[in-house]
Each structure stands twice: as C-alpha cells, then as structure tokens.
Image: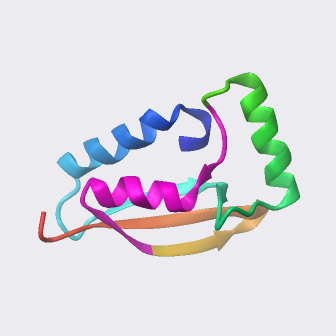
Amino acid sequence: MIHISPPQCTKGLFAMSAEVVKPGGLCILYGPFRRENFMVESNQRFDLSLRARNEDWGIRDLEDVVAVAEACGFQLDEVVEMPANNLTVFFRRRRSD
C-alpha cells in the first residue's frame, strides 16, 4: 500500500494504527522497499513506473518507514524476505505508550 500512495499516507497508517493496535500488537507491511539505499534492478524499474504515474508514489526507504513507525510508538520487530524482491515487515506496538 505505501508504495502506491503519497508519503503522508504512511504517517497516517501508523498514526491510526497506534490508536487501534494494542500494546504488543503488530502492524504488518508487505511490498518492495529500498534498503540502505539499495534496490534490485527490477524494483528500480518498478519505482520509475510508479513515479511516472504519480510523482508522490514510489518505493519507500525502509529506514524512513521505520522512523515514521517509531515516532508513532512502534518498533521494528522483524523483516522477512519474500518472493519477487518483496519484504514482509513486522512492527510491534511498544508497551510503554
């Protein structure tokens, strides 16, 4: 979802998730991400095609998404590599919030 929406939607996703996900619960994202400023060639092409359709769309930096999540009370719990150069990313709601 976050690669086919403006960056503000990622902030909104985590802000609203913080209101409904109980402490210890998960917010799970799936899709392509840039990691440590790197993307495989197929994801680079996909990113260009997304941005050609809408300049606010595009594959997000995982590090930026983690920062947004942390600001909303989530911590990165696990990253699982999936087929087709996608990731499943697990964010756990902190218990102290």
How many numbered circles are shown?
Answer: 0
Residue depicted at x 78% and y 26%: 52
Quadrant in the picture for residue 2: top right
Residue 49: x %, y % from top left: 81, 34
Does 60 appear in magenta?
yes
Image quadrant holding the C terminus, namely bottom left
- Work out whether residue 74 or residue 1 is closer to the camera in this orientation and state it: 74
| Residue 46 image-quadrant placement | top right
In the rendered structure, the answer to whether residue 47 lies left or right of residue 3 reads right
Please provide percent x and percent y for residue 80.
58, 74
Residue at 56 percent across and 64 percent down: it is 88
Of 30 and 8, which appears nearest the observer? 8
Residue 89 lies, with reference to residue 12, above or below; the image says below
Residue occupying the far left of the picture: 96
Residue drawn at x 17%, y 66% is: 23
Residue 48 can be seen, yes or no: yes
Residue 56, how many percent across, how many down? 60, 29
Q: Residue at x 74, y 66 (%)?
A: 83
What segment is highlighted magenta in the picture?
57-77
Q: Is residue 1 visible in the rendered structure shown here?
A: no
Colour option used: rainbow
In which quadrant of the rendered image does the N terminus lie? top right
Q: Choose top left, top right, bottom left or bottom right for residue 57.
A: top right
Q: Please tell me whether residue 32 belongs to the stretch shown in magenta.
A: no
Q: Is residue 25 above or below residue 50?
A: below
Q: Position of residue 4 (x, y in %)?
A: 61, 35
Q: From the viewer's perspective, is 73 left or right of 64?
A: left
